Amino acid sequence: MSDDESRVASAGTRANVLRLSGPCARWDERDADFIRETLDLVGDKWSMLVIGALAAGDARYSDLDTEIPAVSRRMLTLTLKRLQRSGLVDRTAHAEVPPRVEYSLTGLGASLLSAVEYLAAWSSEHHTEIRRHQDTYDRSATEGRRPA
Amino acid sequence: MSDDESRVASAGTRANVLRLSGPCARWDERDADFIRETLDLVGDKWSMLVIGALAAGDARYSDLDTEIPAVSRRMLTLTLKRLQRSGLVDRTAHAEVPPRVEYSLTGLGASLLSAVEYLAAWSSEHHTEIRRHQDTYDRSATEGRRPA
DNA sequence: CGGCATCCTAACAGATACTG
DNA sequence: CAGTATCTGTTAGGATGCCG
């Protein structure tokens, strides 16, 4: 499609400029660190699913367990704990019997949602192209093994 | 409709009911799938660093190794291969001696960059708040412990 | 120089049983 | 109901040596 969308900095420049000079280097190690932080937080297998589920409204532990059938209770617990620890999810335990615990998205969690939607949009837009590249790559790799 | 949440347990329907408590239930399983796809692709430890490094211009293998000191050669190789396989990174091997291989970001890779920058912006904006939450959480958890 | 193959460890993740 | 504890398998990732 549009290969010309973001001709970042190269256009014939030398190789090892990287970030150490020039006005085009807008990717600092701090940025990378921020991204890593976020990725470590929600880049795992279940966080996004949980956040997505909670985006539609509060849910109890068993609701989430039902809603995300593939997740084990262990991972659900761990995921919820981490999200809660970072303030993305709120946990409300009602002191009654039988116990009722409700989870909800905090404002922080909801704000992440929009960032993630941006990523989802990118993925939805490009996943066909990605698949095609992967397919091409795999095919050429296979063909290389049998040079007739 | 909204008076009872027991609909969640409705037999047979695996659907993501999400307890539609508002007009905001717009997170389909496809979205989650797209996100997972992207996360599987670049959610690992090094992809973002590599993409960030390449965003500033083409780089050789050893440049990247130097630029990202923490990465092992093994992981750098694996990361580059995956990114190349998915069409996010281009690999150009010059047939000369000593060998020279240059990596560059494709248009696809560059387009991902903007999505990631969005995430980085979120992270940069909220990481203080996140830290604060984590700190609070950890402190309250520690206070419950007994100093054996 | 630019890798790939091998070995090794640790974190991740699933299943199951048990508890308050 | 809402978890915790334990055991186990799988995978990510690091260190290093060899080779084109």
Image (tube, coloured by chain):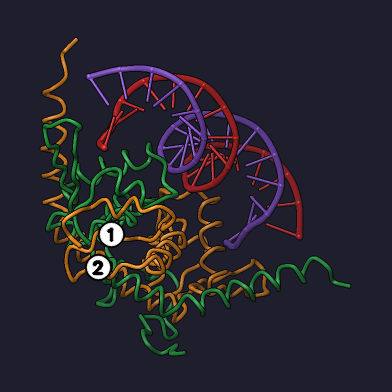
Chain colours: A green, B orange, C purple, D red
Residue A141 visible from this viewpoint: yes
Lateral position of residue D5 relative to residue B92, left or right = left
Badge number at residue A1:
none
Q: Which amino acid does label 1 sit on?
A: Leu
Of the 4 image quadrants, the one containing the C terminus of chain A is bottom right
Secondary structure type for disc 2: loop
Which residue is at a point 17% across and 53% down the rendered structure image?
A: B127
Front one among A16 and B143: B143
Q: Which amino acid does label 2 sit on?
A: Ala
**Rendered location of residue B8, percent (x, y):** 31, 53
Front one among B58 and A85: A85
Q: Are marks 2 and 1 on the same chain?
A: yes
Lateral position of residue B79 relative to residue A33, left or right = right
Secondary structure type for disc 1: loop
First in sequence: mark 2 vs mark 1: 1
Which residue is at a point 29% across and 73% down the rendered structure image?
A: A118
Which residue is at a point 40% across and 52% down the rendered structure image?
A: B11
Q: Quadrant of residue A14?
A: bottom left
Subunit that carries the residue with mark 2: B
Subunit that carries the residue with mark 1: B
**Rendered location of residue B83, percent (x, y):** 51, 66
**Rendered location of residue A74, percent (x, y):** 38, 36
Q: How crowded is mark 1: few (under 14 residues within 10 Å), some or many (20 or more)?
A: many
> Marks 2 and 1: CB-CB under 8 Å?
yes
Badge number at residue B18:
1
**Rendered location of residue A82, percent (x, y):** 26, 42
Q: Residues within 10 Å of mark 2 (few under 14, many from 20)?
A: some
**Outermost residue toward the right?**
A148
Q: Name the residue under label 2.
A: B25
Which residue is at a point 58% across and 78% down the rendered structure image?
A: A132
